Image: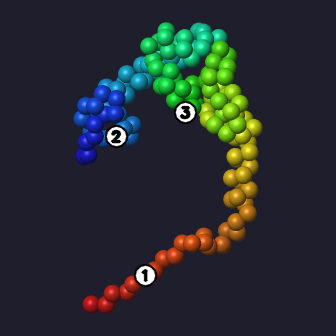
Amino acid sequence: MPVKNCPQCRKIFQANLFDICDACRSKNEKDFFKVKEYLEENEKCTMHEVSQETGVSAKRILAWIREGRLEATIGMGGDIACRACGEPVSKGNFCQNCAQKINNQAEELLTSQSPHEKPKGIKMHTKIIKD
């Protein structure tokens, strides 16, 4: 089994799906539930207040919001912006309008190609070797 250095604590651990050691993963989950509980009780708090009160970095809280694990509070207002247009978002990376545009463009791209059309630029060569 391959081993890695944990990016958070730098200890060596057996590689896993989470790319961090079990101790750091456990701490992250405890921090997550601490933040989630705080947000449920304080819906008008800012990102700075959540970070101060829970001891969890704003960067980590923002990552959980971007992942869709947490939803931003009313007090976070403009703290989290759509990656496409800059409008405030409460969850994820894109506002509802931009997410819809992206989905429409992807759907249009998929339906515009014939199912029998070969992708351009991809070639495969084979060589038969006789002994």
Query: What amino acid type is highlighted by mark number 2?
Result: Asn
User: What residue is shown at x 72% (from left), y 40% (from top)?
Assistant: 98
- Residue contact at pointers 2 and 1, CB within 8 angstroms: no
Task: Calculate the distance from the C-alpha at mark 1 to the C-alpha at mark 3.
Answer: 43 Å
Residue 100 image-quadrant placement: top right
Under tag 1, what secondary structure?
A: loop
Residue 16, which numbered label?
2
Please provide percent x and percent y for residue 11.
25, 31
Given the current orientation, which residue lies at the most extreme bottom position?
A: 130
Under tag 2, what secondary structure?
A: loop
Q: Indicate which label's residue lies in the foreground, 2 or 1.
A: 1
Please provide percent x and percent y for residue 12.
24, 35
Query: What amino acid type is highlighted by mark number 3?
Result: Glu
Above or below, 105 relative to 11: below
- Residue contact at pointers 1 and 3, CB within 8 angstroms: no
Of callouts 2 and 1, the N-terminal one: 2
Please provide percent x and percent y for residue 105.
72, 52
Residues 107 and 58: in front is: 58
Residue 42 image-quadrant placement: top right
Write down the residue under mark 1: 126
Task: Calculate the distance from the C-alpha at mark 2 to the C-alpha at mark 1.
Answer: 37 Å
**Quadrant location, the C terminus:** bottom left
Please provide percent x and percent y for residue 38.
54, 12
User: What residue is shown at x 54% (from left), y 14% (from top)?
Assistant: 48
Question: Within 10 Å of the Cα at label 2, are there few (<14), some (14-19), or many (20+) other Cα atoms?
Answer: few
Write down the residue under mark 3: 67
